[in-house]
């Protein structure tokens, strides 16, 4: 079955950096667009970033643009989220998701990894 396993979360200080990874298995990774989403306590899920299967196209949520970078390594079936200049409001559970080509929605989701940013 499809598995998406996030790692790299933890505690960071304001202004610091973290790098999240999401290892995928059970799907044709190189044919899937990948995304990162997050959910803070008491809030709805928020779009963070997405990357196309070929890495040609990326897009970011307005709150992270210029600070976060999404990338992928199709040889390793892994997608990354480099988070710089972290702010307290970046505190959330971060989820990766996969959208197989020709699908209109993200069909597979990971269990999430906690990111906590404190001053």
Image (cartoon, rainbow, N blue to C red):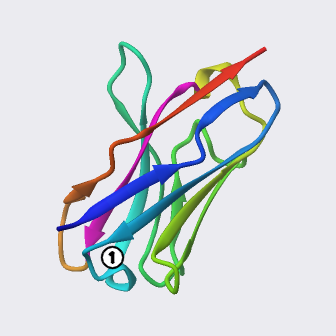
> Is 29 situated above or below 35?
below
Categorize mark 1 by other alpha carbons within 10 Å: few (<14), some (14-19), many (20+).
many
At 31% from the left and 64% from the top, the residue drawn is 98
The C terminus lies in which quarter of the figure?
Answer: top right
Q: Nearer the viewer, residue 38 or 73?
A: 73
At 67% from the left and 23% from the top, the residue drawn is 117
- Give the main secondary structure of the magenta stretch: strand
Picture coordinates of residue 22, whole percent (x, y): 47, 59
Q: Nearer the viewer, residue 74 or 26?
A: 26
Pointer 1 residue: 32
The N terminus lies in which quarter of the figure?
Answer: bottom left
Q: Is residue 6 magenta?
A: no
Specify whether 20 is left or right of 46: right
Q: Nearer the viewer, residue 55 or 12?
A: 12
Specify whether 100 is left or right of 7: left
Picture coordinates of residue 54, whole percent (x, y): 47, 84
Picture coordinates of residue 19, whole percent (x, y): 67, 51
Res. 42 image quadrant: top left
Q: What count of labels does the image hold?
A: 1
Specify whether 28 is left or right of 74: left
Q: Is residue 96 magenta?
A: yes
> Is 85 situated above or below 31?
above
Picture coordinates of residue 61, whole percent (x, y): 51, 45
At 24% from the left and 58% from the top, the residue drawn is 106
Q: Could you tell me which secondary element the residue under label 1 belongs to?
A: strand
Q: Which residues are magenta?
A: 91-100
């Amino acid at each position: 079955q499809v598995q998406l396993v996030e790692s790299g979360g933890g505690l960071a200080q304001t202004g610091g950096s973290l790098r999240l990874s999401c290892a995928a298995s059970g799907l044709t990774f190189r044919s899937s667009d990948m995304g990162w989403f997050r959910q803070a306590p008491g809030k709805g899920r928020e779009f963070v970033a997405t990357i196309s299967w070929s890495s040609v196209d990326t897009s970011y949520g307005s709150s992270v643009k210029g600070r976060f970078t999404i990338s992928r390594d199709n040889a390793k079936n892994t997608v990354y989220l480099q988070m710089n200049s972290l702010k307290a409001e970046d505190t959330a559970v971060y989820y990766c998701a996969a959208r197989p080509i020709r699908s209109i929605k993200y069909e597979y989701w990971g269990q999430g990894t906690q990111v906590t940013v404190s001053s």
